[in-house]
Amino acid sequence: MPTPFILMLRARRGPDQWVAREEYDVLPSVPVSEFTDPYGNVCQRLIAQPGPFALFCSAEVMVPDQIAQAPGAPFIEIQHLPTEALSYLLPSRYCESDRLYALASDITWNCLPGYDQVAAVEHWLRTNIRYEPGTSPVPVSAIEVRQRSSGVCRDLSHLGIALCRALSIPARLVVGYLHQLEPMDMHAWFEAYVGGQWYTFDATQSGRKGGYVAVGYGRDAADVAIYNQYGPPVFPIEHYVTVEELQR
Amino acid sequence: MPTPFILMLRARRGPDQWVAREEYDVLPSVPVSEFTDPYGNVCQRLIAQPGPFALFCSAEVMVPDQIAQAPGAPFIEIQHLPTEALSYLLPSRYCESDRLYALASDITWNCLPGYDQVAAVEHWLRTNIRYEPGTSPVPVSAIEVRQRSSGVCRDLSHLGIALCRALSIPARLVVGYLHQLEPMDMHAWFEAYVGGQWYTFDATQSGRKGGYVAVGYGRDAADVAIYNQYGPPVFPIEHYVTVEELQR
Amino acid sequence: MPTPFILMLRARRGPDQWVAREEYDVLPSVPVSEFTDPYGNVCQRLIAQPGPFALFCSAEVMVPDQIAQAPGAPFIEIQHLPTEALSYLLPSRYCESDRLYALASDITWNCLPGYDQVAAVEHWLRTNIRYEPGTSPVPVSAIEVRQRSSGVCRDLSHLGIALCRALSIPARLVVGYLHQLEPMDMHAWFEAYVGGQWYTFDATQSGRKGGYVAVGYGRDAADVAIYNQYGPPVFPIEHYVTVEELQR
Amino acid sequence: MPTPFILMLRARRGPDQWVAREEYDVLPSVPVSEFTDPYGNVCQRLIAQPGPFALFCSAEVMVPDQIAQAPGAPFIEIQHLPTEALSYLLPSRYCESDRLYALASDITWNCLPGYDQVAAVEHWLRTNIRYEPGTSPVPVSAIEVRQRSSGVCRDLSHLGIALCRALSIPARLVVGYLHQLEPMDMHAWFEAYVGGQWYTFDATQSGRKGGYVAVGYGRDAADVAIYNQYGPPVFPIEHYVTVEELQR
């Protein structure tokens, strides 16, 4: 039975991420219609016919070697936030920030408002939620992650995002690739808006090593599923991911 | 202490809703900055100073007398939906459509796909979830509404939306006014996209009487709070709503 | 014969312009569909039936008493301009900036790049192009205005805009109302982007008195016709404009 | 002296144009910032340092073999046009449609309104304006093209667009590549909106052969310069273009 898909597989283009080469193959070839979602992600709509169906994406992307850090970067008051950041303040499907005020305050009670609060949230996640690499088929929400005290990269990010929003700090999920991730797979991390720009946080990694390639931004995993398939599920989906450093 | 607000109080302008007159007073007067959110709602950002603070909004709006109905209007396949409708297919904070597939199938098992499914969902809500007019300060989610078997207008809408999305039918929350609502207050209902357009559904009312004035659209109540206040809560907020029919 | 119109008559909402009250009547009443154009102007589409047809618009708008001035505000280099400003750098129907480099250089040869250049352009217009209040039915272009050495408010603005763009300074036309304009009518002026924001310039007025109410922004008069009527012309269109100061 | 550039070199992604592979090199490597303009074109902003500077773009794009034709496709009345098409009705820098009503009526006096009018315009261009392949450094406008009775591909398109708009038919310029263009170079053609969709017209070619790869859309050449360079001109710019058919 023909199955419609919406896919989000192209590397984002942006100020810190230059896509020098990109390749996208659909086999067998079917008509693909592209559109841009409200978060600026380029998505593909297509209908897979019955039988084997494969997608190959490859890109050569220039990204920073190091994640920017900014201890002391101040909290931005609501009235001074850029319009685009406002929707990242609201609770969303997997980030119930409206029920995490107390925990967020506890974690950050002695921090300067702003970057230091987010750094404290990231540190708390690293210390309190066990990171279990791998993929869980069904996303769970921040409240559930907190109860389980463990999760995949997406789960830690959801809880981090919900805690930031509970502090009135805009936060968003990023899905993409990370160089030297162990084991290699798609990855998820989060960004928080403090001191007038978005900063990257990742509770699954230590150090501030770069190599992050963003594929999709959104309020949480509901917005940035790399694929949404509608209709009866398709099995199995094999999924290979590799990331290599290029010398230029 | 000065308190930032984001407000959503202007009647929407659209094909079926003509705003002939509008008034918006802020007392005491403070600078107001307006912006349009990703759902097309016009929002106001302002900072209320300590002391009494009041907002008066009034509008004269022409809307249909009757809600459009379309039994038999077909389900629109994913690949033919307009781009704008796609984000209304995803689960959201208060509409966990990803966990309601079984219920949605049960309710609609003998329906033609499309309008008739949504009508069956609306009928099921009317019969199974007790409508309790009034305001609940904290929104609860579709799953919680189902467990409680009762709720305010917003709660019934959230469950209706989540059930539609579980059937791959785009659905969105509308917040606004309804002529002759008893008791009078802000109101919430939902729209579903079938047969190539959005149709209005409201499980709290019987008949297909019109008089709906839309103020905000969104995925759920997280997107269309008529006010979001940041910082320590402000008490009390008195809130008066009146809707009258005008003869012209 | 029914005649389609696209109208642009609502006061803009923005950071420096708060619309406290607004009224818009169409007589006889016909369906009106509203949309927002690429410049953020709210437009109305409607079809006037044969016979008398009238529009009444009225608004209560709070605007600054004084036009902001910023001698010395610097030129912003192309790479630092906000994306939204870039389309205001290009030549347009009535602003042939691509043919005015020499004149623009002559007028501003001894100015600091930025605000002072625009002020010199405004001064040059005031001194070299005779302002003839009134309405000319057909817009003429900057090059033609220069040849005629006279023009209505719109014409002076077109030449001012074209000269700014020839200097790589973004400039846009504003159509709207001006308190105490003599004789009272719709008015047109221009804004230039220097020192990180848009500043108002008006070669038809002396002093920096405020009272400007913006109705439409665009690259030139082709974008901000307050009405575009399609099909055989409709005669006569009576047009009354009044602007009063309100005490609050 | 460092020179800022805005470039528009990526093949568009759209319903009829699938970009399977893309490569974009900037030598020497400099930071590039990408943004999307109001017409949906992806643009690059960068600053070229003094010295040699080169750009290499290459893409593998699937496009139709034949241009769609639709004799008899009807004129769409203003009130039924999609909002996005409305700005392509207005006169623009190089398309003075406001001064071509008489010529447009003459050319199409015996045509059914719609596609057949545009086909008549295209035929008239082919017969009355001599196509001179090559590049003219400075764009000239529709009125000027008519006076000269000859022009490059861009000039013929400008006149075609202006004539369509004079008939209240939305029309837009497309810049891109054409397979087997003789001599090979960047190319320009136009699209007109009739019968509910955009159709391709090209007065420089005979037959309805496909192989068109769109790079930029806009109202005219002012919007879709493949590069805009600001500051003192840079010489020489060598420019090589090749288009090959791929077997897959």
Image (tube, coloured by chain):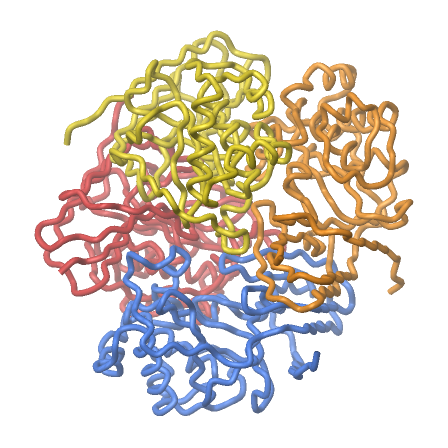
Chain colours: A red, B blue, C orange, D yellow
Quadrant location of residue D244?
A: top left
* In the rendered image, the vertical position of residue C166 relative to residue D171, given as above or below: above
Please give left or right for residue A6 compared with residue D120 in the image: left
Q: Position of residue A180 (x, y in %)?
A: 23, 39
* In the rendered image, the vertical position of residue A5 relative to residue B16, given as above or below: above
Tally of marks: 0
Residue at the image point whose x is 76% and y is 37% from the top: C154
Quadrant, the N terminus of chain B: bottom right
The front one of B74 and B142 is B74
Residue at the image point whose x is 35% and y is 43% from the top: D70
Please give left or right for residue C147 compared with residue B209 in the image: right
The front one of D246 and A246 is D246
Q: Residue furthest front?
A: D110
Q: Position of residue C230 (x, y in %)?
A: 61, 48
The front one of B8 and C228 is C228
Residue at the image point whose x is 21% and y is 60% from the top: A136
* In the rendered image, the vertical position of residue B78 relative to residue B54, given as above or below: above
Please give left or right for residue D88 compared with residue D181 in the image: right
| Residue B230 visible in the picture | no
The front one of A89 and C60 is C60
